[in-house]
Amino acid sequence: MISRWRTIVAELKKKTLVLYYAFRDPRTPLLTKALLFFVVAHTFSPIDLIPDFIPVLGYLDDLVITPLGLYIAYKLIPYEVLIEAQQKVEQSPADLSRIGRVGAILIILTWLLALVVASVWLLNIYED
C-alpha cells in the first residue's frame, strides 16, 4: 500500500511540474496562468493553507485543492502547450525549492490578509 501511495504522489508531482512549465509558456492565457500559479505554489509549499492540525479541514485542502486544481488547469491549458510541457518534464525536471518558497510566501500573505480583515471586522462590531 505504501508503494502505491508513493506512485500516486510521484504522479501528482509530475503533473504539477507539467503545470509549472505550462505556466512559463507565453501561449498560456493569463487567467489560466493565475490558476496554475496558485495550484503549483500550493502543492509545493512547505506551509499549508489550512494547517493539518485543524480536524478534517486541515487535510481536506490538500485532498481537494491539488487534485481539483490539477483537473481544472489541465482542461484550460492549450493542447500544444500541454504536450510541450510534458516533454520538458521528461527531459529535465524543475527546481522545486524556489516554487515552494514562493508558495509559502503566498500562504503567509493570505493568512496575514485574513488576519487584517478579521481585525477590521471585529473593530467595526465593537465600535457600534
Image: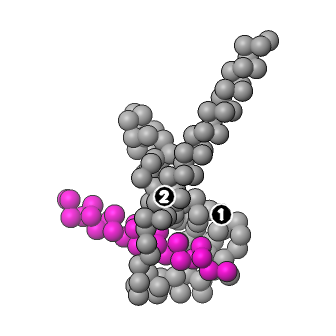
Q: Is there any visible trace of residue 111 in the rendered image?
A: yes
Amino acid type of the residue that numbered disc 2 sits on in the rendered structure: Arg
Q: Residue 7 location in percent, x, y?
A: 28, 68
Q: Residue 5 location in percent, x, y?
A: 27, 61
Q: Nearer the viewer, residue 12 or 51?
A: 51
Amino acid type of the residue that numbered disc 1 sits on in the rendered structure: Ala
Left or right? Give the position of 76 relative to 103: right
Report the number of discs. 2
- Name which quarter of the figure residue 57 lies in: top left
Disc marking residue 34: 1
- Determine whether 64 is above or below 56 in the image: below
Magenta stretch: dominant SS?
Answer: helix
> Which residue appears at 52% of the width and 72% of the height?
20
> Which residue appears at 59% of the width and 73% of the height?
23
Left or right? Give the position of 15 relative to 113: left
Q: Residue 124 location in percent, x, y?
A: 76, 20
Residue segment shown in magenta: 1-26
Disc marking residue 99: none
Q: Nearer the viewer, mark 1 or mark 2?
A: 2
> Which residue appears at 57% of the width and 52% of the height?
106
- The quarter of the picture where the N terminus appears is bottom left
Q: Secondary structure at mark 1?
A: helix
Disc marking residue 101: 2
Q: Nearer the viewer, residue 29 or 112?
A: 112
Color encoding of the figure: one colour
Earlier-in-chain disc, 1 versus 2: 1
- The quarter of the picture where the C terminus appears is top right
